[in-house]
Amino acid sequence: MSLSRVENPCFLLFLAVFQAIFILILYRGGASSVFRGFLDAPQPWEYSKTQDVYTNLSLFTRAPNEETMPYCIAQSPIFVGPLTITFNAFPSERMIIKKNPFVQFGGCYSPPHCLARYKSAIIVPHKNQEKHLRHLLYYLHPFLQRQQLHYGIYLIHQAGNATFNRAKLLNVGVREAMKDEDWDCLLLHDVDLIPENDYNLYVCDEYYPKHIASAIDKFQYSLPYWSFFGGVSALTPEHYMKINGFPNTYWGSRGEDDDIAARIQLAGMKIVRTPIHLGRYKTVDLEQHKGSEEYPIRPAPLHNTRKTWKDDGMNSVEFKLLSRKKHLLYTNITVDIGNAPTLPPEDKNKEKRA
């Protein structure tokens, strides 16, 4: 005689397990917590339909009483998604200042209507790239304000005629920025990259270093190789010190990205990435530099990172501070970081003797 479904032991076991899971769901905060992942699943963005980065920014007005200001809500109410990014007009500094009335000297900003939940320092290494800087400042200030961040922008200018050393300048920038404030997050930002989506949050991951520029136009909006950590990245000060910062010995190359990826692994961490549909960036003057700045092939390693990372980094950076000046849109730090080491001349008779 066959058992009914209600009397079937397997069905009763399934029913008991289901009830236990349901009770656990209610105890842990309701069914919404289970389905939140489905509800928040990323929708495909339509990047052919964009909005101005200054859209609705004027809705953020000064609170009548700063002492009773609430904390900013978790998600900004003025997010629009894809942003219109063009480089047809060269923005003047006066115009950028006028469009960002709440930015204070040193390039610092706090939301006028609420207390920011995050404090982010934006560190931009450069060498005589005024055009790139103007475009970056024009877009980056409103982009960060849309996210209701407390932030400061630091421009780290390499003086002299030495070969550019991005990684060493970042070490300098971190050291100088941390003198001003206990920043929650350090954003290491290339001067020629402009974010395309205001949902791309400039905050750190709590546990691991985060690579933010996961989809750059010059790489056809994809990663050039798996260990790539360049463009824009975010590390907490603790993460940065745990990997001993960036290497100081990469002059004129982008090999430091692989070095950093190795350091992160050696320090017992991993890289997390902003999803490709959010981490999109446009390159200033892409057409002008096309073919000269692309490096989709992984560069050959210059060092044995396993042997060098504990001695080459924040604990060994040397530089001369030439000036530190607060402008209305940024803090400018000009430094002399020395020259690349000269290699000994090749012995032309070596091959003959061989």
Image (cartoon, rainbow, N blue to C red):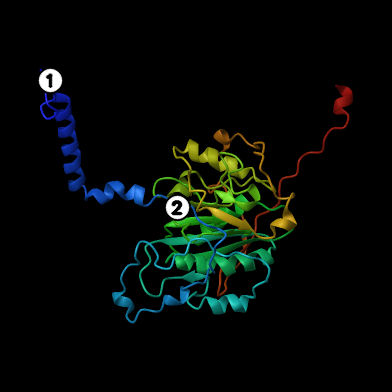
The answer to whether 94 appears left or right of 64 in the picture is right
Q: Callout 2: few (<14), some (14-19), or many (20+) C-alpha neighbours within 10 Å?
A: few
Closer to viewer: mark 1 or mark 2: 1
Q: Callout 1: few (<14), some (14-19), or many (20+) C-alpha neighbours within 10 Å?
A: few
Classify mark 2: helix, strand or loop: loop
Q: Nearer the viewer, residue 250 or 83?
A: 83
Contact flag, marks 1 and 2 (Cβ < 8 Å):
no
Q: Is residue 135 above or below residue 37?
A: below
For disc 2, the marked residue is 43
For disc 1, the marked residue is 2
Q: Position of residue 345 (x, y in %)?
A: 82, 38
Q: Amino acid at mark 1?
A: Ser
Q: Residue drawn 63% across and 67% down?
A: 135
Quadrant for the N terminus in the image: top left
Compute the Cα span from label 1 to label 2.
49 Å
Q: Amino acid at mark 2?
A: Gln
Q: Residue drawn 87% across and 32% down?
A: 348
Q: Earlier in the sequence, mark 1 or mark 2?
A: 1
The answer to whether 191 appears left or right of 203 in the picture is right
Q: Nearer the viewer, residue 125 or 46?
A: 46
The answer to whether 89 appears left or right of 263 in the picture is right
Classify mark 1: helix, strand or loop: loop
